[in-house]
Image (cartoon, grey):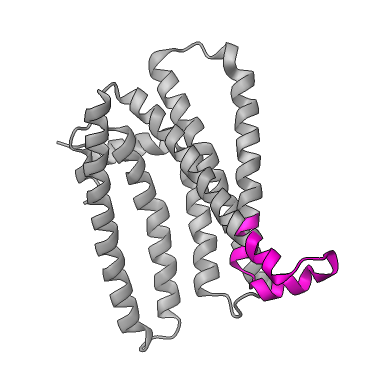
Amino acid sequence: MFRLKGTYKEIIREHWFSVACFLVATFFASITMSFMPTYHSMSDKAFSCLSGIFFGITFAILPFEAYRAWKKNVSDDNSGKKGGFIAALIAVTAIGIILGIANGIFSSTTTEGLARNLESFGFTEKTVLTMANTEFVINLIFVLITYIFALYYFYKASGLPAGMYILKVMVAGVISLIWLGVSAAIYIAIGQAAAGLVAYFYQIYILIFLLYIGLVLYPFSLILLSKTKSNPSCHKAII
């Protein structure tokens, strides 16, 4: 029997910082999406930047958490590499924060508005659009690199052959995506139906759904990736 409660607590202990950051990021994102009175307002920009910062920290921290969890299983002596670990952690986290701020600015500001603000510095609308596209690509590369490193250490910690681990992760990933799609459809359908009856109900519904992603789906995605050895049926956890 899959001990869901115990495994969830174990994941929270191992990845408490990235889980907390992801939860905070989804909270700020839900405020931006639901409760901002004016899109592209200063408050919208502030919450978008805060959301971007915490998402950036989440992806920056995750591979280091995975590395520490793996090293705990293979060795207790990490003193020789502690300095390098901390330096790399600070550097990658700084990159995540900078990219998060950039994403928050570009996602909460129109290209025309940003070009007007930067016109005195010689930036045109075309230049700003190029910057926005470049920022998106760099953020995507950053997320992919950190995710791949985290996945590598999850695989090392599992002790499984590469083929078996990939198969388990693929099966778990498909089931997770299906469950996310179904739950999102149900949440949105109910929210849309009630939006016309209760003022601000839909905004509150979006807040609850995004917090559900941060508090439930993100930790369970870590369970699916990192607990494949001790819990061969872990892909059922999301259900």
Residue found farthest to the right? 120
Residue 24 percent coordinates (x, y): 52, 54
Q: Residue at x 64, y 33 (%)?
A: 90
Q: Is residue 7 left or right of residue 57?
A: left
Q: Which x, y percent locates residue 26? A: 48, 58
Viewer-side residue, 38 vs 129: 129
Residue toward you, 205 or 65: 65
Q: Residue at x 59, y 11 (%)?
A: 80
Q: How many numbered discs?
A: 0
Residue 210 included in the magenta stretch of the image: no
Asked whether residue 230 is in view, the answer is no
In this view, the residue in front, 52 or 238, is 52
Q: Extreme front residue here? A: 126
**Membership of 109 in magenta stretch:** yes
Decide: is 154 above or below 121. Answer: above
Q: Quadrant of the N terminus?
A: top left
Stretch in magenta: 102-130
Q: Residue at x 61, y 39 (%)?
A: 93
What kind of secondary structure does the magenta stretch mostly adopt? helix
| Above/below status of 125 relative to 91 | below
Tell whether 148 sits left or right of 17: left
Q: Quadrant of residue 122?
A: bottom right
226 relative to 233 in the view: left or right:
right
Name the residue located 61 percent from the left edge and 55 percent from the top edge. 135
Q: Quadrant of residue 69?
A: top left
Near-viewer residue (2 or 227)? 227
Position above or below: 77 against 7: above
> x, y percentage for residue 210?
42, 62
The reply to whether residue 42 is in sight is yes
At which x and y percent is residue 40?
63, 74
